Amino acid sequence: MTIRTCKIMVVLLTVIFMQSISFASQEGVLNLSNFAIKSEGIGSSGTVQITGVANNEQAVISLKIEAFGKEYNLSQEELAKIPKGFYNGIQLSYEEGYKELGGKTIYIVLQMGFVSGIRNKVLITFAENGSIKIEEMEAKKS
């Protein structure tokens, strides 16, 4: 092969490679539109069940928490504190807690992520005394 032929082959291979990259598949988010998770609980948490609905504008429009033998539906004001987002995951955890700080606590994390990592997270803290707190969390970007 001549040097000219080698250069032409390199250019052709580069063009073919670049075209294959432009048509590469990309991972997309499957937004939770209706969701329900249930845990039999640990310790004295009792059964915990979370159910919710998100609309086409990526807003959570309904969220019900069943825990500590009670049922709690988030108000419109509380739902408005949950940032709109393509949530495709839920994490659920529990803390025994101190009575003077609200007692037993359920932590619900709504998250959006990919195989490469979590991009957005919202923490919903629900205490046995009925207090609720909603806050965006820093997500580790990979």
Image: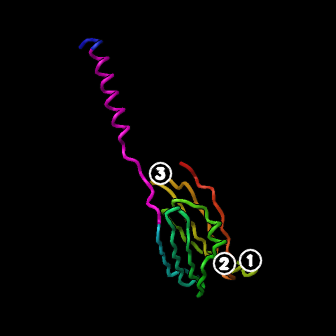
Q: Which quadrant holds the N terminus?
A: top left
Position of residue 54 relative to residue 44, above or below, is: above
Residue 85 seen anywhere in this rendered image of the structure: yes
* Between discs 3 and 2, the one toward the N terminus: 3
* Dots 1, 2 in contact, CB < 8 A: yes
Mark 3 and mark 2: Cα distance apart in space: 32 Å
Q: Is residue 6 magenta?
A: yes
Front residue of 21/108: it is 21
Q: Nearer the viewer, residue 119 or 51?
A: 51
Element under disc 1: helix
The range drawn in magenta is: 5-32
Task: Give the Cα separation between the discs numbered 1 and 2.
Answer: 9 Å
SS for callout 3: loop
Compared with 82, 9 (above or below) is above
Q: Which residue is mark 1?
A: 101
Q: What residue do we see at 65% from left, 66% from top?
A: 81
Q: Secondary structure at mark 2?
A: strand
User: Residue 132's quadrant in the figure?
Assistant: bottom right
Q: Residue at x 56, y 71 (%)?
A: 61
Q: Residue at x 46, y 71 (%)?
A: 34
Q: Is residue 123 left or right of residue 22?
A: right
Q: Earlier in the sequence, mark 1 or mark 3?
A: 1
Q: Main secondary structure of the magenta part?
A: helix
Where residue 127 is drawn, which disc sits there? 2
Which residue lies under the disc numbered 3? Answer: 116
